[in-house]
Image (cartoon, rainbow, N blue to C red):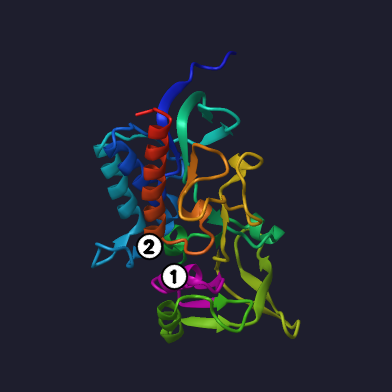
Amino acid sequence: MSDPDPMHTKVLILGSGPAGYTAAIYASRAGLEPIVVAGFQFGGQLMITTEVENYPGYPEGITGPAMMEDLQKQAERFGSRILFEDATRVDLSARPFRVEVDRNVYTADSLLVATGASAKWMGLASETRLQNRGVSACATCDGALYRDKPLAVVGGGDTALEEALFLTRFATQVTLIHRRDQLRASKIMQQRALDHEKIDFLWDSVVDEVLGEDAVEGVSIRNVKTDEKTRLDVDGLFVAIGHKPNTDLFEGQLKLDASGYVEVTAGSTRTSVEGVFACGDVADPTYRQAVTAAGTGCMASIDAERWLAEQGIE
């Protein structure tokens, strides 16, 4: 079967978190009629975020999904075309760039990469076996399933503490398991967790195994300083140990750093390929905030608009 005739656009945006949607708002207002490949798991990590309290303009806070719905509607209002499908292949070897989406092919004069990052797992066979049967990386999605049950969270950053605090709405007790003896989270999040009567801490500890056959019944804990092993009885385990940038599509095509994040020129969103720009968490191992992602989405759109003008593409 021959390839379908490709559909062409001046700006194609891969990703639909705050970076991708902000880029779409700016590009569509500039009359560039962008196509957004939002993905099946559209909206990025904010779709699994409960309360967003630190985004300017929301004095009472807002849920992540509600914010993403607002950004989507705003992008569509100005003419962005949004596809709720995944890109399966990208060819950046020549312009126009070629992107395969399901059975369709798109070509683009410029490409904005806003594919974000995904949660990391511990890498245990028992963890994999019991995913969706008590092991989760999304308290928002699964926390209510464990009402009046003891739960555990692995991690020590803001995400881990946000998960733990959210789970206190349902759990009888939440134990936070952290491999160090102090937290990496912001001071305000640390204080909230340390002050919460339902949250306990296991310091200098890692999970060796998730226990249970058909559902989580507990975890085997190892103290990294003494090697002592203990069992913690819980009905659910939530993993919050960091993120991996979603850059598999670009390996060998864009310059990536040692952790897989897209490298951009300092002070811009330009990548190693002319006409390709990167924004949001896919290019940000440091801040990884909704507001910084949105800011770089704006930058990427302006960078692309100016670059297209330089090429004589208006």
In the rendering, at what x and y percent does residue 12 appear?
A: 43, 34
State the residue in front, 236 or 243.
Answer: 243
Few, some or many C-alpha atoms within 10 Å of disc 1 (few <14, some 14-19, many ≥20)? many
Q: Does the magenta stretch include residue 163?
A: yes
Of the residues under marks 2 and 1, which one precedes in the sequence? 2
In the rendering, at what x and y percent does residue 155 appear?
A: 56, 71
In the rendering, at what x and y percent does residue 164 appear?
A: 47, 72
What amino acid does circle 1 point to?
A: Glu
Which quadrant: the N terminus?
top right
- Residue that numbered label 1 is attached to: 162
State yes or no: discs 2 and 1 in contact (Cβ < 8 Å).
Answer: yes
**Which portion, as a residue range, is magenta?**
150-175
Q: Which disc number belongs to residue 50?
A: 2
Question: For the point 33% across and 31% down, which residue is it?
Answer: 33
Residue 9, quarter of picture: top left
Q: Secondary structure under badge 1?
A: helix
Few, some or many C-alpha atoms within 10 Å of disc 2 (few <14, some 14-19, many ≥20)? many
Residue 188 can be seen in this image: yes
Q: Which disc number belongs to residue 124?
A: none
In the rendering, at what x and y percent does residue 158 appear?
A: 47, 71
Q: How far apart are marks 2 and 1 (CA)?
A: 8 Å
Q: Does the magenta stretch include residue 95?
A: no
